[in-house]
Image: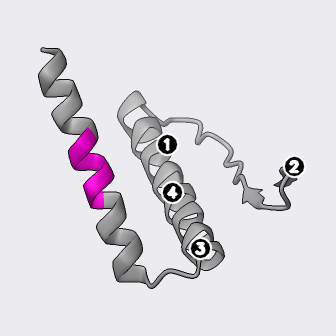
Amino acid sequence: MDVKTGNGLVVQVEAVKKPENSNKLQELAAMEEALKKATDEAHRQRVELSGQSESEALSQSAESVQSKALLELKKQ
């Protein structure tokens, strides 16, 4: 299913039927995979819209993650 957001971006959501005999571990692994795919697609669209190269975008993402980690450490 495609959901168009207010600014024209498209987010694709994939629905998968739960296997009959799946356990919680298998369900969580499937959820992680779906989130990874969605994250990768969002990143690709962001890079495309910003006009940045892939390496510039990855560098900014790494800096953002480091900043968040430092803030969390300071809170503790």
- 36 on left or right of 69: right
Task: Examine the structure image and report whether residue 2 is included in the region drawn in magenta.
Answer: no
Please say whether residue 35 is visible from this viewpoint: yes
Q: Which residue is mark 2?
A: 6
Between the C-alphas of marks 4 and 2, the distance is: 19 Å
Q: Which marked residue is nearer to the observer: mark 4 or mark 1?
A: 4
The residue drawn where x is 54% and y is 74% is: 47
Q: Nearer the viewer, residue 41 or 65?
A: 65
> Which quarter shows the C terminus?
top left
The residue drawn where x is 35% and y is 63% is: 60
Crowd around label 4: few <14 · some 14–19 · many ≥20 (10 Å): few
Residue type indicated by callout 2: Gly
Closer to the chain start, of discs 2 and 1, is: 2
Q: Position of residue 22 (x, y in %)?
A: 48, 36
Q: Position of residue 10 (x, y in %)?
A: 78, 61
Q: Secondary structure at mark 3?
A: helix
Q: Which marked residue is nearer to the observer: mark 2 or mark 3?
A: 3
Q: Which residues are magenta?
A: 62-67
Q: How is the image coloured?
A: one colour
Closer to the chain start, of discs 4 and 2, is: 2
Residue type indicated by callout 3: Ser
Q: Which residue is mark 3?
A: 50
